[in-house]
Image (tube, grey):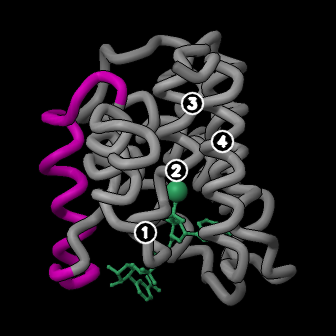
């Protein structure tokens, strides 16, 4: 059985390798891995130190954005972490509009640990849109994103007071 620290760092290394060619959408095209690391940092700042949640946060975009499969994560990290990552992944067979709606519909029904990861994801993304937004986004598009993120977060109210308060503080910066 790996130690807690070992599990979290193994997830960081696995995600870094999977996202090695990935870039965020900001003007500087930041390395993608900065984002999952940011989620883990947000969770620890909210006193969440469950290694399963932190590892899942580090891995949360590997299925959605890289060639990683659920089975692969399950083999390396076990079924609990693989299931959390799957719960945080959009169904790529749906259109972008359907995926946005599906997040609103599903956020309230996922596991507690997946909700923590999803809350951190929305905090990180609205924070990025405020500080390092996707290149070319209009004020209108930023507002739409903030409002959609809030709709998703509103389905998860009562999950974690500190994370929800942090989201609300980020939402207050809505352009
Ligand atoms: P998204 O709105 O999904 O892009 C945001 C996503 O990109 C985030 O959720 C985040 O996801 C990731 N991301 C990467 N870099 C950044 C960053 N620097 N800051 C914040 N997020 C970042 O874009 P899509 O192109 O997929 O469009 C989705 C929807 O937007 C569609 O429904 C479309 O109809 C609509 N749209 C609206 C327009 C408008 O002007 N209002 C124009 C075009 C489309 P993750 O955490 O997974 O990395
Ligand atoms: Zn993400």
Query: Quick one: which residue is furthest to the right in this view?
Result: 28
Taking the spot 79% from the left edge, 80% from the top edge, the residue there is: 29
Secondary element at image label 3: helix
- Quadrant occupied by the C terminus: bottom right
Q: Is residue 67 magenta?
A: no
Secondary element at image label 4: helix
| Of labels 3 and 4, the one closer to you | 4
> Residue 18 location in percent, x, y?
60, 69
Is residue 124 in view from this perspective? Answer: yes
The residue singled out by tag 2 in the image is 59
Dot placed on the residue nearer the N-terminal end, 3 or 4:
4
Instruction: Answer yes or no: disc 2 within 8 Å of ligand 2.
Output: no
Q: Are marks 2 and 4 in contact (CB under 8 Å)?
A: no
Query: 54 or 39, which is in the foreground?
Result: 54
- Displayed quadrant of residue 15: bottom right
For the residue carrying disc 3, how many other residues have a C-alpha within 10 Å: few (<14), some (14-19), or many (20+)? many
The residue singled out by tag 4 in the image is 10
Alpha-carbon distance for marks 3 and 4?
A: 11 Å
Dot placed on the residue nearer the N-terminal end, 3 or 2:
3
Alpha-carbon distance for marks 4 and 1?
A: 15 Å
The residue singled out by tag 3 in the image is 54
The region drawn magenta spans: 93-113
Q: Are marks 3 and 4 in contact (CB under 8 Å)?
A: no
The residue singled out by tag 1 in the image is 68
């Amino acid at each position: 059985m790996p130690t807690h620290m070992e599990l979290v760092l193994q997830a960081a290394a696995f995600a870094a390798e999977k996202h090695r060619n990935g870039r965020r959408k900001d003007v500087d095209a930041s390395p993608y891995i900065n984002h999952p690391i940011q989620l883990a940092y947000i969770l620890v700042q909210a006193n969440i130190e469950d290694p399963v949640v932190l590892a899942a946060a580090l891995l949360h975009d590997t299925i959605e954005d890289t060639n990683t499969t659920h089975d692969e994560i399950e083999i390396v990290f076990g079924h609990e972490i693989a299931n959390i990552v799957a719960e945080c992944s959009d169904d790529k067979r749906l259109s972008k509009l359907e995926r946005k709606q599906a997040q609103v519909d599903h956020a309230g029904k996922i596991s507690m640990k997946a909700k923590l990861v999803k809350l951190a994801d929305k905090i990180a993304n609205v924070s990025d849109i405020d500080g390092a937004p996707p290149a070319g986004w209009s004020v209108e598009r930023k507002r739409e994103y903030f409002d959609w993120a809030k709709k998703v977060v509103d389905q998860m109210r009562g999950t974690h007071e500190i994370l929800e308060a942090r989201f609300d503080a980020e939402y207050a910066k809505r352009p």
